[in-house]
Amino acid sequence: MSTTTTERGTGRPARQRGDVVFAGVAKGAGVLILLALAGVTFFLTFEGIPGLTGDDSVYSGKDGFLSYVWPLVYGTVLAALIALLIATPLAIGVALVTSHYAPARLARPVAYTIDLLAAIPSVVYGLWGINFLAPRLVPGYQFLQEHVSWLPFFAGPTATTGRTILTAGIVLAVMILPIITAISREVFLQTPKLHEEAALALGATRWEMIRTAVFPHARSGIVSAVMLGLGRALGETMAVAMVLSATGVVTFNLISSVNPSTIAANIALQFPESSGERVNVLIATGLVLFVVTFAVNFAARSIVARGQIKG
Amino acid sequence: MRRTNIRRGLAPAVATLALATALSACSDDSSADEGEGEGSGLSGTLSAGGASSQEAAMAAWRAGFQEANPDVTVNYEPIGSGGGREQFISGGYPFAGTDSALDEEELAAAEEQCTAAPIEVPNYVSPIAVIYNLEGVDELNLDGATLAGIFAGEITTWDDPAIAELNPDADLPGDPISSVHRSDESGTSENFTAYLDAVAADVWTHGEVGEWPIEDGEGAQGTSGVVDAVSNGSGTIGYADASQAGDLSVANIQVGEEFVGPTPEAAAQILEVSPRAEGRPESSMAVELARDTEEGGAYPIVLVSYLVACPTYDDQETADLVKGFLSYVVSEEGQAAAAETAGAAPLTSALTDEAQGLIDGINAG
């Protein structure tokens, strides 16, 4: 702090060639990313608009763009929500273990392993989901259907292949786990040691210390981590396309073989055999996904901002 | 210790290198010999594309043809039937693969591009199997109406009277049927629904469609997805290219009085008994598939793919290349290669001869 104030006092900072080049490169990178985003937006908008008001025949049996895209939006959000509900507590738990509970000797390998999960291609997750995970979840789903079918989520009938939206959500949860864990862990580690020690000195248990010192400090970081995870869950294509038995319905039922598809998976499935206006329709659904992701991000940022004013 | 390790690792590496050099020297010699000796005279590049259903067979044909003619390169872009026809009509492809024959408008446009009526020859016939996974039932007979009922969601348990009547000897459980269909748009779905539409239009009321029209049943991505879903589930039934059925049980379909399985012979037979599509030029071998045939021994759920080409080309080189390649594809050798790698049904010799006759007429002019 003190050094910057003295420098400011001397007037303009010295500028050397290195500074100029670096500033230019940094600015260029910033402008480039904005241009790329703008390019994507323009492409989606111009190519997508004809798809909004097409002839009924291009909406594969649905009567208009809204009724075509609505089940997809629902499925996208539902799958992402399931993934977040499973992954967030798990990720925060793992992050806490590796940052505060486990001895360093153990914490390091665990953290590395979790990071490794991020390097697995999504098509491998898809294969794992369809051939390994899904069949093994069927007995669980049957149990749910037998005992808690009064909940609309588990009304059944159970999919005998296990390829349900709940399975897709679980696969997504595993996929977003490393992102949320890695970021949360970094944030937890940055909690000021003095705060932690102060809490412990006041007689707090370790859990109370984490609750009163670590969590408040890390709150915005956790939200950012969850948002990044959500972004991946919303946009994940291959794994969902492979695992989910998508038939385009809107239902709360999580364990049957009739499920809504997601926007990204639907584009991947239908694009190869589409031509003409049907491509426009698919691009228009991409635009909707873009808007949904934006909206979710803005909502999250406002939550973070509110939290900071309070703290 | 360390030294021995390095030496151990080094020895095979050196050996491999030496072997590779020797081998490459050998192959250089032999290819040079072939070029002078056999001298098929064909050289150049042929870039075409179209139906993705033919992709696996096309890989075998390209390899076979290029082996016989080392100076030729054949490319095939699996961009889809519609794209293939479009490119062919606009002159982008010298020939194209397509799962459905050119329609009237496309015929006229192609005739203009070729300056003569285009050639259409069936080159790839692939049976679509009805696969199922039901414990204790190794043989299953179905007729069109029952199959349609299952996929339309009207027949929901395996001991349904309609199924029981066709399978008096089978011990059918009361398990629910879970029917698996393609969740992506596909020619397999289109041919399957075309069959249902042809034989049981009163039960299957959704017509011939590439994208699954109803919300019943389970969706799976691609042929592999359907096969995986059927194998992993229980009481499942689906449809997939017969060559991909693997260890799964395959249902026999009632044709006339018989129950026929998706064998290559039965699939080729349906082409024989189907009438030619009407109102087409003589150079077209497009058939109106008689999916509702009662002819014994013919399997009605098939995918038939065609090659379309011009009878005349502007330059001699292209004409020779197209002629050479297409001849190879419909030849006994080419059809056998496709049968081996892609599980296609080889054309009957009568069809091969007719196709060969059309292809022989290709020239430059």
Image (cartoon, coloured by chain):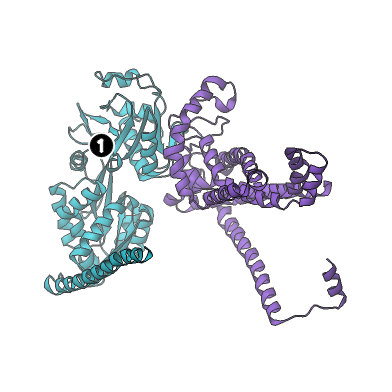
Chain colours: A purple, B cyan
Q: Which residue is mark 1?
A: B300
Q: Image point 13% across, 53% down: which residue? A: B353
Outermost residue toward the right in this view: A9
Q: In front here: A13 or B92? A: A13
Q: Image point 73% across, 38% down: which residue? A: A207
Residue B247, position as x, y percentages in the image: 28, 36
Q: In front here: B222 or B332? A: B222
Q: Residues within 10 Å of mark 1 (few under 14, many from 20)?
A: many
Q: Is residue A103 above or below residue B129?
A: below
**SS assignment at label 1:** loop
Q: Please count the marks in the image.
A: 1
Q: Quadrant of residue B321?
A: bottom left
In the displayed structure image, the side of residue A13 where residue B61 appears, left or right: left
In the displayed structure image, the side of residue B172 where residue A163 appears, left or right: right
In the displayed structure image, the side of residue B131 where residue A130 appears, left or right: right
Q: Is residue B365 visible?
A: no
Q: Quadrant of residue B168?
A: top left
Q: Is residue A309 visible?
A: yes
Q: Amino acid at mark 1?
A: Pro
Quadrant containing the N terminus of chain A is bottom right
Q: Image point 48% across, 32% down: which residue? A: A137
Q: Quadrant of residue B299?
A: top left
Residue B107, position as x, y percentages in the image: 31, 56
Q: Image point 35% across, 63% down: which residue? A: B5
Residue B350, position as x, y percentages in the image: 13, 48
Residue A56, position as x, y percentages in the image: 51, 43
Outermost residue toward the bottom in this view: A17
The chain identifier of the residue carrying mark 1 reads: B
Outermost residue toward the front in this view: B1
In the displayed structure image, the side of residue A110 where residue B93 appears, left or right: left
Q: Is residue B19 above or below residue A268?
A: below
Q: Is residue A44 above or below residue A159?
A: below
